[in-house]
Image (cartoon, helix red, strand yellow):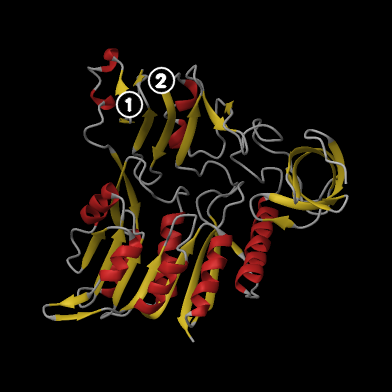
């Protein structure tokens, strides 16, 4: 079989959706993963990568369009442009159906689970735009700001991001120059209006005038910025989030859900999944600023115990501050796997190495076999697994099944409209 030259145009009939914002086609017996297309379309595609087993390509001309195709609202979306959005060319209902198919296929293939999936809308972005409250901008050497192209370090300069929340756009990051910076993260709270810019640099950087605090990470302000207190890195600025009747402090670029309605939606879903009781012991793994530990602490009350585990030092400080009024909730700092080996629960001389409930919200890489094994031993009644990656979720569900835990419920949420990402809450029970 002759090799396919990169950038060669090939005609393809598009098949099913695949994880990661791709659709699947075949060319001369080989699988082709194609972006900027939809199932059922016939397209001309430009090959962007060839491997031993498959090709990658971008659809550059639509010969037969899907009825779900729409005009992308963003001028920077499309082949060879910004890589931030995968599905701007699909209607919102179609996007959710595509994401549901991906979750369903990953569960079937990796966990051996057959389950119908419905991706639910998250309140706060009815048109799929203006929702992202945290945006990581890249910076070129000349200080121009943009977003990276798909699977590339190249920067696509932009003057506006349509999925960014209005409070993010109000910072004006894209319309300023950032000489010396390697990246700028815009952070905003839809609930409180707090705003913050987190600036990354390896050397000296000129900080533009901002009407919000600027946290400088890994560099030094230019001498001309010495009088600008907002550019000093000693005290990490934070934003406050208003969720579940509480204010949550989140420092710098610490983890928080980026959709303005996602934190409340997921907190409610976790409580529904775990069905906490007043004397329960609960554990929140990868607890971040303490969201799930806090809502579980409220639901369980002072006759129970809740323990959060988090490795990031600043997140631990935030979580302890956020939960300071709940004496039955504590936060332990350390690697989740290591802390789980040592953890005991109880008061006075009575301690246990079992918990009634466990919630885990690991990074995109998932929990992994060793953490799953310990959680399966630790949990007594229910586990809630929050995941933003269907593949690692399905892999870990297969690990849980090896230890006698069964998937009893699954909810999926469109917490990232216009992208391929989807948030899931899986409920596991023994048996």
- CA separation, marks 1 and 2? 9 Å
Question: What residue sits right under mark 1 in the picture?
Answer: 219
Is 270 rendered above or below residue 212?
below
Crowd rating for badge 1 (residues with CA inside 10 Å; few <14, some 14–19, many 20+): some
Extreme-bottom residue of the structure: 431
Please report the residue visible at 41 percent of the width from the left and 78 percent of the height from the top.
382
Check residue 180 in the rendering and tell me which mark sits there, or answer none: 2
Is 400 rendered above or below residue 27?
below
Tell whether 70 sits left or right of 318.
right
Q: Where in the figure is residue 412, as x and y percent of width and height?
A: 56, 63
Q: Secondary structure at mark 1?
A: loop
Please report the residue visible at 22 percent of the width from the left and 35 percent of the height from the top.
235
Tell whether 52 sits left or right of 11.
left
Quarter holding residue 192: top left
Say whether residue 200 is visible. Answer: yes
Please report the residue visible at 66 percent of the width from the left and 35 percent of the height from the top.
77
User: Label 2 near label 1: C-beta < 8 Å?
Assistant: yes
Is 92 rendered above or below residue 77?
below
């Amino acid at each position: 079989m002759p090799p396919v030259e990169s950038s060669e145009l090939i005609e393809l009939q598009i098949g099913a959706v695949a994880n990661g914002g791709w659709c699947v086609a075949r060319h001369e017996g080989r699988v082709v993963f194609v972006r900027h297309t939809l199932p059922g379309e016939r397209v001309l595609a430009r090959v962007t990568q060839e491997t031993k087993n498959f090709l990658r390509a971008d659809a550059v001309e639509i010969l037969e369009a899907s009825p779900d195709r729409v005009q992308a609202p963003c001028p920077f979306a499309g082949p060879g442009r910004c890589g931030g959005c995968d599905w701007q060319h699909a209607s919102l209902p179609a996007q959710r159906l595509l994401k549901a198919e991906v979750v369903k296929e990953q569960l079937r293939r990796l966990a051996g689970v057959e389950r119908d999936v419905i991706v639910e809308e998250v309140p706060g972005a009815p048109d799929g735009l203006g929702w992202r409250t945290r945006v990581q901008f890249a910076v070129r050497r000349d200080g121009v700001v943009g977003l990276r192209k798909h699977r590339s370090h190249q920067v696509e300069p932009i003057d506006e991001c349509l999925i960014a929340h209005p409070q993010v756009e109000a910072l004006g990051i894209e319309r300023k120059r950032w000489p010396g910076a390697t990246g700028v993260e815009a952070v905003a709270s839809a609930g409180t209006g707090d705003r913050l810019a987190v600036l990354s640099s390896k050397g000296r950087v000129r900080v533009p005038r901002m009407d919000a605090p600027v946290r400088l990470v890994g560099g030094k302000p230019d001498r001309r910025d010495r009088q600008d207190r907002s550019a000093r890195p000693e005290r990490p600025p934070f934003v406050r989030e208003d969720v579940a009747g509480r204010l949550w402090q989140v420092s710098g670029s610490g983890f928080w859900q980026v959709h303005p309605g996602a934190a409340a939606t997921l907190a409610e879903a976790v409580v529904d999944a775990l069905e906490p009781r007043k004397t329960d012991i609960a554990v929140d793994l990868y607890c971040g600023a303490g969201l799930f530990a806090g809502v579980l602490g409220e639901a369980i009350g002072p006759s129970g115990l809740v323990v959060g585990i988090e490795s990031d030092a600043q997140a631990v400080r935030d979580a302890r501050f956020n939960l300071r009024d709940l004496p039955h909730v504590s936060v332990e700092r350390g690697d989740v796997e290591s802390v789980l080996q040592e953890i005991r629960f109880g008061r006075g001389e009575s301690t246990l190495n079992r918990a009634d409930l466990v919630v885990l919200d690991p990074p995109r890489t998932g929990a992994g076999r060793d953490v799953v094994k310990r959680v399966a031993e630790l949990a007594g009644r229910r586990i809630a697994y929050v995941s933003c990656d269907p593949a690692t979720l399905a892999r870990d569900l297969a690990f849980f099944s090896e230890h006698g835990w069964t998937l009893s419920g699954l909810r999926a949420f469109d917490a990232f409209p216009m992208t391929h990402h989807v948030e899931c809450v899986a409920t596991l029970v023994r048996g």
